[in-house]
Image (cartoon, helix red, strand yellow):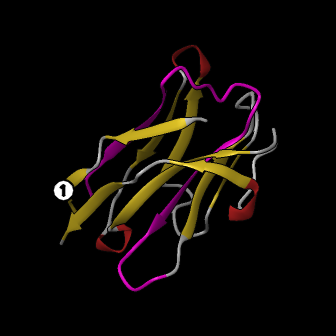
Amino acid sequence: QVQLVESGGGTVQAGGSLRLSCAAASGGTFSNRAMGWFRQAPGKVREFVGGISWNGGVTIYGDSVKGRFTISRDDAKNTVYLQMNSLNPEDTAVYYCTRNRFAGASDIAGLYDYWGQGTQVTVSS
């Protein structure tokens, strides 16, 4: 069992930045596994935000966040990050960290097995 704990969410004005963190708790690890971030806004379907391969060599992003968000990982700290810049109100959502079953970065939700509880990001106009 791997417990993922997100932090860093909050309220920010449009144009601002936030950095989300996702740590593996209870002795869990995600070494050798790809990691990802998804988000879900009220009344909307879950949306892929970004994914990173097991060694950080490959990163992929959803179209709506390309050029603004950056995913990274520090396996020594068992932590994955999502740097979010140039935020706009459409980025308002609950953001979820998740671990992939495999090593390659992916935007397919079904390939992810463990999910965090989510952290709220609210962007005001």
Q: Quadrant of residue 108?
A: bottom right
Residue drawn 45% across the image and 83% down it? 44
Q: Which residues are magenta?
A: 15-44
Query: Does the magenta portion include 50?
Result: no
Most foreground residue, 113 or 59: 113
Name the side, left or right, on which 81 lies relative to 54: left
Percent of width and height locating residue 118: 39, 53
State whether residue 64 is above or below residue 100.
below
Name the side, left or right, on which 100 lies relative to 7: right
Name the side, left or right, on which 17 lies relative to 50: left
Q: Quadrant of residue 66?
A: bottom right
State whether residue 124 is above or below residue 83.
below
* Residue position marked by numbered label 1 in the rendering: 11
Residue drawn 24% across the image and 64% down it? 123
Most foreground residue, 26 or 64: 26
Q: Which element is circle 1 on?
A: strand
Query: Does the magenta portion include 24?
Result: yes
Percent of width and height locating residue 121: 29, 58
Percent of width and height locating residue 40: 44, 70
Name the side, left or right, on which 116 lies relative to 18: right
Most foreground residue, 10 or 115: 115
Q: Residue lying at the far bottom in this picture: please name it.
A: 43
Residue 108 visible, this angle: no
Quadrant position of the N terminus in the picture? top right
Q: Quadrant of residue 58?
A: top right
Q: How many marks?
A: 1
Residue drawn 43% across the image and 42% down it? 83
Percent of width and height locating residue 50: 60, 53
Residue drawn 18% across the image and 56% down it? 11
Residue 12 visible, this angle: yes
Quadrant position of the C terminus in the picture? bottom left
Within-10-Å neighbours for mark 1: few <14, some 14–19, many 20+: some
